[in-house]
Image: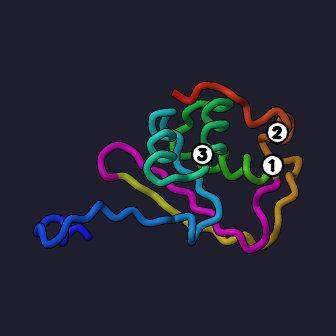
Amino acid sequence: NYLIRKLHLAKSKPYIPDFRRAIDHFFPHVGGSVVINEVERTLKLDVEAPRMTLYRFGNLSSSTVWYELAYAEAKRKIKKGDRVWQFAFGSGFKCSSVIWHAMKSVDGEKINPWFDEIDDFPRKFNSG
């Protein structure tokens, strides 16, 4: 796709893969609402967990991906066989990515950091 566009062999839009076909849950690093909005807009991903993590805990750098996973677990969204993609990026060329395969369904364990107030989420607010 890139070469076709650069060599002007044909008119073509940039290729953006549909990650939703291979992954069940996406947890990007929460750099701020602007980052979340762009991930949602360009990749068409569900960003409830990142938004709620930013709302409740703020920007915790790359560790936010673990709070997002805990959010999904507390909401009982992670089922046996699901594929979870955690990815974080920073200044320059820093990027980290991992894909997990759920070995069992998660039933919102009490050791989860969201356990005490998960029923109050998601919160409604302006995302801009």
Residue that numbered label 1 is attached to: 74
Residue type indicated by callout 1? Ala
Residue type indicated by callout 3: Val
The relative height of residue 22 versus residue 51 in the rendered view (above or below) is: below
Q: Is residue 16 above or below residue 58?
A: below
Q: Residue at x 23, y 67 (%)?
A: 2
CB within 8 Å, label 2 to label 1 = yes
SS for callout 3: loop
Question: Residue 86 magenta-drawn?
Answer: yes
Left or right, residue 76 beside residue 45: right
Residue situated in front as seen by the camera: 13 or 30? 13
Q: Which residues are magenta?
A: 76-93
The answer to which of 29 and 12 lies nearer the viewer is 12
Decide: few, some or many residues near mark 2? Use Cα within 10 Å; few <14, some 14-19, many ≥20.
some
Where is residue 79 drawn, in percent x and y? 78, 66
* Residue at mark 3 to residue at mark 2: CA–CA distance: 16 Å
Q: Which residue is farthest front?
A: 11
The residue singled out by tag 3 in the image is: 47
User: Who is closer to the viewer here, 39 or 9?
Assistant: 9
The answer to which of 101 and 13 lies nearer the viewer is 13
Q: Mark 3 or mark 2, which has the lower sequence index?
A: 3
Task: Identify the amino acid type marked 2.
Answer: Ile
89 left or right of 4 in image: right
Which image quadrant: the N terminus? bottom left
